Image (tube, rainbow, N blue to C red):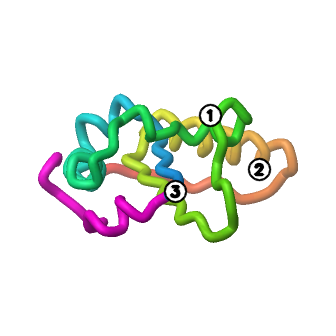
Amino acid sequence: MEDRRELDDATISRAGVIAVDSREQARRESGDLIQGLISANRGWESVRELHEIVGGSARGRYSEEDITIFKSNGIALWDVAAAGYVYRQAIEQGRGRKLEVCGD
């Protein structure tokens, strides 16, 4: 996957803030950043995890002109946790309807 890209080098170079869901995962799977950071002469220490910015331990944009990139590689466990939360809320609020799931 390190050879797959959606962002070009110019975009990576212009970004004031680069955030990912997981730096470790991005270092293995994000061709955009693996190749783009090398081309931009930037290191992984400049990449922030989203929770760091949201939690206030890392700064986001410095100005409204800054370009921000969020590269999500997707963490399945987060998807399952979000789905579980939505499901519990629906049950508590008496919303939705049960679906029968049948196999072939």
Image coords of residue 41 (percent x, y): 27, 47
Please state which of the two labelled residues, at mark 3 or mark 1, is closer to the viewer: 3
In terms of depth relative to the viewer, which is nearer, 4 or 36?
36
Q: Which mark is residue 104?
A: none
Residue at image position (42%, 64%) is 14
From the viewer's perspective, tell me whether residue 101 is left or right of residue 84: left
Amino acid type of disc 1?
A: Glu
Label 2: few (<14), some or many (≥20) within 10 Å?
Answer: few
Label 3: few (<14), some or many (≥20) within 10 Å?
Answer: some
Give me the C-alpha separation between circle 1 and circle 2: 30 Å
Residue at image position (35%, 29%) is 24
Rendering quarter of residue 29: top left
Q: Which mark is residue 52?
A: 1
Amino acid type of disc 2?
A: Ala
Residue at image position (64%, 48%) is 60
Which is more N-terminal, label 2 or label 3? 3
Determine which residue is flagged by label 2: 90
Determine which residue is flagged by label 3: 16
